[in-house]
Amino acid sequence: MAELAYALAGKILEKLGSLADKEISLVLDIKSELTELEGTMTTIQAVLLDAEEKQATNRPLSIWLRQLKDIFYDADNVLDEVEYEVLKKQVMRTYGRTSREVCGLFSCCSAFAFRSQLGHKIKDIRQKLGKIAANKDQFNLIPRLEDRHVIHGRRRDMTHSFVPPSEVIGRNDDKENIIHLLIDPYADTNAINVIPIVGIGGLGKTTIAKLVYNEERVANHFDLKIWVCVSEDFDVTRLIKDILKSANGAIDEKLGVDLWQISLRNSLKNKKFLLILDDVWNEDRSKWVELKGLLSGGSIESRIVVTTRSRSVASMVGSGRTYTLEGLSHDDSLSLFVKWAFKEGEDKQYPNLLEIGKEIVKKCKGVPLAIRTLGSLLFSKVDELQYWKFVRDNEIWRLEQKEGDILPVLKLSYNPMPSHLKQCFAFCSLFPKDHEFDSNELIAFWMAHGLLNKTPNSQNLELEDVGDMYIKELLSKSFFQEVTDFTWFYKFKMHDLVHDLALKVAEEECLTTVDFHTQNIVGTILHLSFSHDDYGREVPKYFYTLSSGMRTTLFAVKQQVPTLAEACISRFKYLRVLDLTYSSFEVLSSSIGTLKHLRSLSLASNDKIKKLPDSICELYNLQTLLLHGCSSLERLPKDTKKMISLRYLTVTTTCTHLFENDVCSLSSLRILGIFVCPRLEVLFQGMVGSLTNLRRLVVAGCEKLTSLTLDNKHLTALETLVIFGCTELSFTGGEDNQDLNLSLQKLEITYVPKLEVLPQWLQGTANTLQYLRIAMCRNLTTLPEWLPSLNSLHTLKIFSCPKLSSLPEGIDRLTALKELRIEECNELIVRKCQEEYRSQIAHIPTVILRRPRLSSNIFAASMGRTLSFDEGEGAEL
């Protein structure tokens, strides 16, 4: 990841700017050294963007960038040490010193030695950096501080509109579906429909568009067909000329843009045209609006098809349904592979190779270009069994790639991204293929490595919000897929081929799928993911060849190696992330407290550990601590309050009372999850401290919990509350105070049998609550009369509440409501809802009312509104 030096330099400069104003820089006599280092860093950063763009074709420049990054990491470690001392001093001021800290930094005789050592480290880094910076002039680098990515030349070859149908396998259903969207007489005719076809590179979007474009039924339906490959920059003048050329066959180059646009509008006037805009990347809506305005003179039965990799583009241009292209079936994939890997009929002569081919096809995950790429590698190699096995057993990124093959095509989406997104994407390579990402945990992982950067436009956002923006940007670019949304987080996956791309761009520093027998680990590796179970009882030999500057160790699968976990803690003192999920040790080494750089620690799903060492509370930099699934954990350490940077905490414990007294002084906490605590009876009672920054609270599987106190003194920032499986819970706190100024936006209550009516304090969220989900509350009999006062509510979902018999009067006052979903509520008569509430729910775009015993649905769609009823016997619309 040498090309990401710019982002790392920015991170260091941000730290330097912060530390320059800290009291500790004066106390440690390092202010002048920090100032000089900041000046050197600023000078170097100015040319890094230019260096990153040029280093691919300049080996000496690439080596220079690598050397810079090594020093950057050293600088980051030293500055992190200074920050740790700042936090340590803050804790000591607030809570006093422990016996271990009596001879701390600012009071004992070792203070001078520490200051001297730290000053020498910073001076050494500044001198090394100065020497390397002096070499930058030989590369003729141009200063540039804007992280822009200019695309030189075309993103890919310009496309044409023809493909022989016989060459296309497995896309007939897609072709028919899109044709139906084009010629559907019942489609919305208020404006020209724009139909985006979206998917990752190599999936066959252009091929599908060609098939549709050349279909006879389409030709007969439209007066005019136009094909334009957008590909490079979305220049409206160029597109006007290209559309005119495609429509009329020629264009007078002597005319100016004004005459061209007049000619375009005249060519399309009142005509029913089909326009294919292939390979669109532009996300500038003003350019799209300008072009669409020039096309508006055609018949409203005209259609525009846009192929794009970006969901943001699809959302921007789409006025009809977005067509998401999926991968080929296995059988179709195999047929396509045979076509490219064998001469006609040859596959039948080599059944052993065909069996290997079936395994190769699986790794392509239905992407035609990947299948074609690997098939082409194997063509005319029927006598090279070992090569077939080599292709089968290696990641695609390790195989030779030509221009137009799958990885170069996917890299077209990676190259234009800003540095911060490139870094975040590359780090995803540490998780195994088919990993289901948890948005909260991935954001915490990025945060631990300092990858979440606030811009002038996002200064008021929390870091978690910045991370959420990054995920959605990667989703929009089709790097992530298969999103499943939950109330307090969402899950998604990365396509295997996109994962291969991440492996390729991160290969210099990240290594995944490490097992006991792994050899030849390069010395630049800083992030390691153990992904196999075959470690035995001993620490593998290669472990001692790893750099002591390791920053990440992940155990991505279940493992039984306490010795390896302890070796990580003792050897890697600069760790930012330590994931010991599924570990099996009973005692966590007290040396965990020496990892002063640690930001994220997971002990999740360790069912043997009973307590944590007190030294864990000395991890003042720790932002994430995951303890869910620790079913034997008796309590949290008494000094948990000293973990003043903690933002994300999950807990499973056997205790009866949680977060009492000063333990609740976790003012940095943003996300709190309390899971499967079978003895927990009281939460937050007698709270002395505060959780004033807590935004998401989840309490699940706490069967004996009887009280959950909410008030606007301690939970002033709470936005999301999820209660699940708390069978004895009764809500308290604020029941008699309907004027609580809560900021709750999402509320989910699931399987809380004692819930008969919604708590009164919910009225205090009238101006903020947007999402309300109630499920499996068997004693809920009615919705409160004040429910229509929730004027910000846009989603109301009620599932499996058998005693609920009616909706409150005044539902029509919920003018912000976009979705009403009531399912499996037998007493809520569907016919009554149809007849008595039809006028009250007429303003809601999506209404779904469903009875459990019926399988058939009757759908009615009108002006974009979805109305769904499950009908009982004899029921009438």
Image (cartoon, helix red, strand yellow):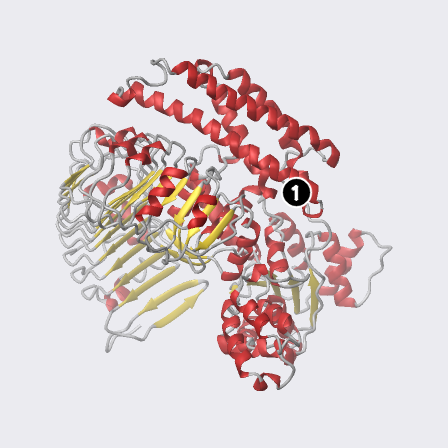
Is 82 situated left or right of 378 in this image? left
Q: Secondary structure at mark 1?
A: helix
Q: Residue at x 51, y 57 (%)?
A: 499
Q: Residue at x 31, y 18 (%)?
A: 93
Query: In the image, residue 846 lies at what x, y percent?
Result: 37, 60
Query: In the image, residue 43 lies at what x, y percent?
Result: 64, 27
Residue that numbered label 1 is attached to: 62
Query: In the image, residue 122 lies at what x, y percent?
Result: 52, 23
Q: Quadrant of the C terminus?
A: bottom left
Query: In the image, residue 838 lies at what x, y percent?
Result: 31, 62
Q: Which residue is more in the foreground, 796 or 469?
A: 469
Q: Residue at x 61, y 28 (%)?
A: 129
The quarter holding residue 570 reads top left
Q: How many marks?
A: 1
Q: Which residue is more in the foreground, 876 or 579?
A: 579
124 versus 728 height, above or below: above
Is 732 situated left or right of 60 in this image? left
846 versus 466 height, above or below: below
